[in-house]
Amino acid sequence: STEPIYCTGCGVEIQTEKKGELGYAPPSALKREVVICQRCYRLTHYNEVQDVSLTDDDFYKILNTISEKNALIVKVVDVFDFTGSWLPGLHRFAGGNDVFLVGNKVDLLPKLINRNKVINWMKYSAKQLGLTPKAVSLMSTKTGEGVLEVAAQIDELRKGKDVYIVGCTNVGKSSFINQLIKQFAGDTDQLITTSHFPGTTLDVIDIPLDDGQTMFDTPGIINHHQMAHYVSEAGLKTITPKKESKPRVYQLNSEQTLFFGGLARMDFVAGERSSFVCYLSNELMIHRTKLDKADELYKQHAGTLLVPPDQEGPLELIKHSFTITDQLSDIVFSGLGWVTVRGEHVKIEAYAPKGVGVSIRPSIT
Ligand code: GDP
């Protein structure tokens, strides 16, 4: 039948087709008398949140609601995919509220990298993107680095107010919330509830805080600018570092090109012989070639020699031009990593799929 079924937990319409999306329940769940969506199931049985993706429209409704509150906003981004996980527009919705910017997955950065430099770069980039955060911190929900400090900072920065946690999908927001739940809510069942977000079919997760205030976990939005959208599940495993990235060094003359799988390309257009240090997933193949052969190579070998993506044929890559004068600089490919370039008056043209951020920063290495 086509009669809609609603989750008895949060009221969302149940669907059995799209795993990970709002209202999903496995088909077997429909046989039960009381039907709840998988998200509510996890929440009630395991005190564990699961991220669901939602439409831009619903997301902006959520942001609008937040702008009317007096609260602390905690924005979680992925340090390895900064622009890809940015959530454009949040600053316009923050209202007068403080924003605490938290960079997760810091474990993916080489240990030798000075954390303060990363924080300064995040502050600078946030300002460029229109947001002045009250504080910036790094953490890894995987190793636990910084997580307790971030929790303590939230408690301090909120000054007795409610807290909204926002972030796009895949930044590690669920992992973070689940650790906060352990931290703040102990193992007391039934403390955590879901409630409807006004004007949407969405629910937020409410975690009570000691002083009677609430921490709200808002659903994550899919950011369409992530490198992840151009690769399969297997490809994503290849480009996402599983552990600290081991730098790979190339001494290049001008008119040489590096391909990073079939996803990105960097042309050394002009300048003296220089060193290029690549901080990428150790599994991502780097292919060096001559600049005048690069176009043809990509046309011929994208999807075969140059992978991921393993789809046959080239992607549409967009060009970004940079000139490095005398500063040690990083060319950052959001979601892939970066290349540190030392050289004087080096001209570089970097290519990435449409929408994927490529930027330059003073080197953090
Ligand atoms: P959400 O979509 O934002 O809720 O993110 P999840 O918590 O589901 O995590 C998304 C992916 O990132 C999962 O594959 C996690 O294992 C991974 N992840 C989350 N936190 C970290 C972290 O601190 N370091 C690393 N390396 N991976 C992480």
Image: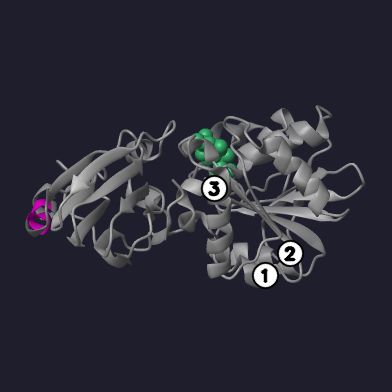
Crowding around mark 1 (Cα neighbors within 10 Å: few <14, some 14 to 19, many 20+) is some
Label 2 sits on what residue type? Ile
Label 3 sits on what residue type? Glu
Residue 296 lies in the magenta-colored region: yes
Q: Furthest residue to the right?
A: 211
- The answer to whether residue 306 is visible is no
Predominant SS of the magenta segment? helix
Q: Which residues are magenta?
A: 293-297
**Residue 132 x/y as whole percent:** 65, 66
Label 1 sits on what residue type? Phe
The residue labelled by disc 2 is: 66
Circles 2 and 3, Cβ within 8 Å, touching? The answer is no
Res. 21 mark: 3
Quadrant of the drawing holding the C terminus: top left
Which comes before the other along the chain, label 1 or label 2? 2
Q: Can you tell which of label 2 and label 3 is closer to the viewer?
A: 2
Circles 1 and 2, Cβ within 8 Å, touching? The answer is yes
Q: Can you tell which of label 3 and label 1 is closer to the viewer?
A: 1
**Residue 285 x/y as whole percent:** 24, 38
Crowding around mark 2 (Cα neighbors within 10 Å: few <14, some 14 to 19, many 20+) is many
